[in-house]
Amino acid sequence: MFSIETKTKPSVFEALFIVIIVISIISIAIGKLGATPHIPILLSIILLIFYGLLKRVPFNILEDSMKSGAISGIGAIYIFFLIGILISSWIVGGTIPTLLYIGLSLVTASFFYTIVFIITAIIGTAIGSSLTTVATVGVAFISIAGAIDASLVLTAGAIVSGAFFGDKMSPLSDTTNLAASIVNIDLFEHIKNMSWTTVPAFFLSAVLYSVLSPSISGLDDTAITSYKASLQATNFVHWYAIVPLIVLIICTFIKMPAFLTLIVSSLVALLLSIFHTSLSFMDYCKILYSGYISETGVEVIDSLLTRGGISSMFFTIMLVFLSLSMGGLLFALGIIQTLLSKFDQLLKSVGALITGTAFTAIGINILVGEQYLSILLTGETYKQKYRELGLHPKNLSRVMEDAGTVINPLVPWSVCGLFIASMLDVSVTDYLPFAFFCLLSPVLTIIFGWLNLTISKK
């Protein structure tokens, strides 16, 4: 967006005042009134348009800046469409149900919190949705914790940590795709680069959960056995259902573009589905567009498997378009550039820039309570600065996820925080100290920045 020509130069006070108003509109609407992000962002766009008109910027110029901002997200739109198709194909192909079955099979009484963390991480990665993982498997684990007298707050912390590991590292996750698309890098290059900070955070978290796990002789696995039986009853659980995942991994290692990788993996999954389903061509068309609808009668399993399809991505796609349009206006009106110029002297080193990026993402999460905006606004704000220091854009996308995606569930008034607290019946402030993965991720990314570890030059 820095290619958008600045049409006015507001004072620092004026730019800060506008930003505060925009953030207030979005945060109050989302956090206090429970509105979807789209409406307050649209209101902010209208506000910025009137501000531009007051600054004597012609409307056609403002309109062009919105178009330029939105066009920068076209690449992401195609990926989002394919992600919706991939999720649907992986369900009917058996990949997601088989991964869920494997995850549930790993549940044991020993090292309970560690097992909860690992399984939610597996399932979160398999389905690419942290909130779905929390609302389904997470709720089941909370019930199990209550039955064996384990700590509910520690269990909730492990659930949140595992779910957001999956949200961060899954190629099916919209936040992961969004972060990669904002800085225009390949999806799998982004995921691979994130592993430098994510893997240490994962293992450190697993160790902490192991140390804190109680000594339990056994647990009542009635619910888990029921879930596994329901998965098998779908006839989707097969050994060969892992093949699409293997294909995706192979395509990633040979550096095939994400667009082609998602297509190939989806086609393989659809081909495999022929061996265990009798769907017609029209059935496949409906599932790929509207998503798969599970009707096992088991609420947890149906919630996990009723998902996917192109239409499921419309919410995210529209949010991306509106946010990028707002970003285009912020740049055309010189608001972002004015504010950045005041911090320019503080962001001369790699460590300082990464720290500033991380705190910006955290700050947006706290002020606005929306993880999409923490990624979008942080990415658009710092892209040029990373270029100036000769840093590869994948460094920026990693920080956006390390300090953006995983911080949202730690904010009590955020979208994720409110949802998780209601699902698990554990307050955000109670589970926050035990969401080790979410707490370690921004710390590690800042430390790596100052030590210049795994920092890629352009």
Image (spheres, rainbow, N blue to C red):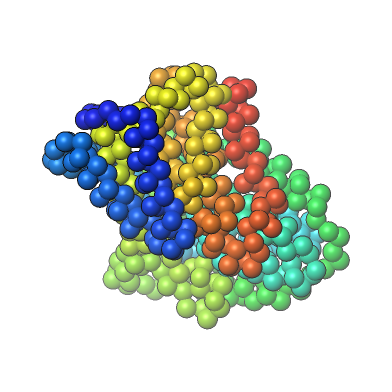
The picture quadrant where one finds residue 70 is top left
How many labels were placed on the picture?
0
| 39, above or below 376, in the image | below
- The residue most toward the bottom is 297
The picture quadrant where one finds residue 19 is top left
| 442, above or below 154, in the image | above
| 343, above or below 204, in the image | above
| Viewer-nearest residue: 266 or 214 | 214
Residue 437 rendering spot, x and y as whole percentages: 65, 46
Residue at 59% from the left image edge and 51% from the top image edge: 410
Residue at 37% from the left image edge and 26% from the top image edge: 384
The picture quadrant where one finds residue 344 is top left
The C terminus is located in which quarter?
top left
- The residue most toward the front is 13
Is 9 on the left-hand or right-hand side of 345?
A: left
Residue 456 rendering spot, x and y as whole percentages: 50, 24
The N terminus is located in which quarter?
top left
Residue at 63% from the left image edge and 66% from the top image edge: 424
Decide if residue 233 is in sight here: no
| Viewer-nearest residue: 162 or 421 | 421
Is 214 on the left-hand or right-hand side of 196?
A: right
| Viewer-nearest residue: 142 or 361 | 361
Is 422 on the left-hand or right-hand side of 207?
A: left
Decide if residue 131 is in sight here: yes
| 356, above or below 22, in the image | above
Is 128 on the left-hand or right-hand side of 279?
A: right
Residue 227 rendering spot, x and y as whole percentages: 62, 73
Residue 168 rendering spot, x and y as whole percentages: 53, 47
